[in-house]
Amino acid sequence: MADQLTTLGLKLPTDPRWVNIAEMQIEDILVDHAYCEQKAASSCISMIIQFPEKDDVVEVLTPVVAEEWAHFERVIEQLNKRGYKLGKQRKDEYVNQLRHIVKKGGSRDQQLVEQLLINALIEARSAERFKLLWKNIADDELQKFYYELMVSEAGHYHNFIELAKKYMPEDYVTERWQEILRDEAEIMKNLEVRGDRMH
């Protein structure tokens, strides 16, 4: 298994062509990245609102909201430095397809765990792509930027996995996580390689 996947659990690496295309379309990548950070913060806020009685959810996700929003601000700063504008949000085909693998129904805790694992998956894939940008793009400032975000997103991935284990047995979480990883690999196989999207 490729090195960057071992700690994240991903079953399929990003197509190596992606980072080269992305570097040529860095404005589009930064715009899409900004919206990804905004959606990550919003997703955590949504879980806090949906599950306010879950003390660990509130405690763990509240600082994640702040971190994701800080990332959004930092991406905006990178856009501004380069004379780029935020522009309109684009359709996120990756996340749209992930919605189809979410299990419906079940207990309230199972529904929470589904959301936590999907969030963990998005963070893991983001960390993998940030690592590719860190290691491969020529822009020194963006290299440092993406290294820092890679570390942060990998940390969030672990937070979501560990939080899921507080609400469902570890065996259940592990088995469901492996199912989700297999489904995500199939999605990745069939997605067009586009350099104007973070995922």
Image (cartoon, helix red, strand yellow):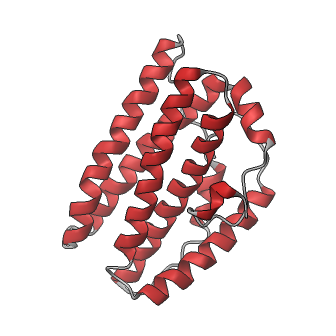
* Residue occupying image coordinates x 70% and y 27%: 23
How far from the left and from the top, in percent, is residue 18? 75, 40
Image side of residue 50 versus residue 176, left or right: left
For the residue pair 17 and 40, the one nearer the viewer reads as: 17
Q: Residue 20: x percent and y percent? A: 76, 32
Question: What residue is drawn where x is 61% and y is 47%?
Answer: 92
Q: In which quadrant of the rendered view does residue 112 lie?
A: bottom left
Instruction: Relative to 126, say whether 180 is above or below.
Output: below
Q: Residue furthest top?
A: 83
Who's the residue at 37% across and 49% down the image? 42
Q: Residue at x 73, y 65 (%)?
A: 1
Q: Is residue 159 above or below residue 113?
A: above
Q: Is residue 113 left or right of residue 17?
A: left
Determine whether, in the image, residue 89 is placed left or right of residue 69.
right
Image vertical order of residue 143 relative to residue 101, above or below: above
Residue farthest along the front direction in this orientation: 3
The one of 46 and 161 positioned closer to us in this rendering: 161
Q: Is residue 169 above or below residue 138?
A: below
